[in-house]
Amino acid sequence: MTLSPGKQKGLAALSTDRGIIAALAIDQRSALRKLFAKAAGRAADDIPADLLANFKSHVSRILTPHASAILLDPELGLPAAAARAPEAGLLLAYEQTGYDKSVPGRLPRLLDGFSAAKLRALGADAVKVLLYYSPFSASAINAQKLHGLNASARNVLPPTFLFFWNSSVITTTWTKKAQNSPA
């Protein structure tokens, strides 16, 4: 597999000197809010966003000196991106938290108001999309996930896209050059 210079640069920013991505993943949103709510004995809706953003910033500042990169969400994680160690790369999530339980296959929904180009402009070395893949799902559902992401990635500036299957294994990367990139 030949990697473009843009892919190489993005992957190098996320990797150790040995080429290993040792990223700190803290792109949780609703799950983190629920954990804080349970610990505080409050409703999840009563947990303020700035509390979660502040928590992510502290975690980033303390742990990114020991990681090759950090995975954050652009909704709550941008202050944490600014607090990361200078040598730590930045992955930004491009999908909304959770999924629509009424739609078979846990199809991802991309963040409103964001594009890969905008995430890149915010400093992302790569964009992460979580795909729930199951070999037991209908092949049409799995194909629909990839088709939808391919359509959303048209005309974007690089970054490298990292797809996480079952939220842990990186299976593919790709970059597409911009023709008329969205803002």
Image (cartoon, helix red, strand yellow):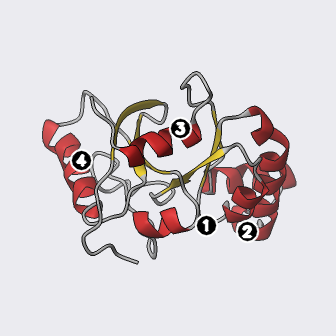
Residue 4: horizontal and vertical position, in percent?
33, 43
Give the CA separation, mark 4 to mark 1. Answer: 24 Å
**Total marks in image:** 4
Query: Which numbered dot is residue 164?
Result: none
State the SS at label 1. loop
Q: Residues within 10 Å of mark 1 (few under 14, many from 20)?
A: some
Q: Which residue is mark 3?
A: 12
**Closer to the camera in the image, 99 or 101:** 99
**Closer to the camera in the image, 101 or 171:** 171
Q: Is residue 109 left or right of residue 34?
A: left
Q: Which residue is mark 4?
A: 146
Residue 56: horizontal and vertical position, in percent?
76, 54
Q: Which residue is mark 1?
A: 75
Q: In this view, which residue lies farthest toward the front?
A: 5
Give the residue at x 84% y 52%.
58
Q: Is residue 175 left or right of residue 96?
A: left
Give the residue at x 57% y 42%.
13
Tell me if label 4 and label 1 are in contact, CB under 8 Å: no
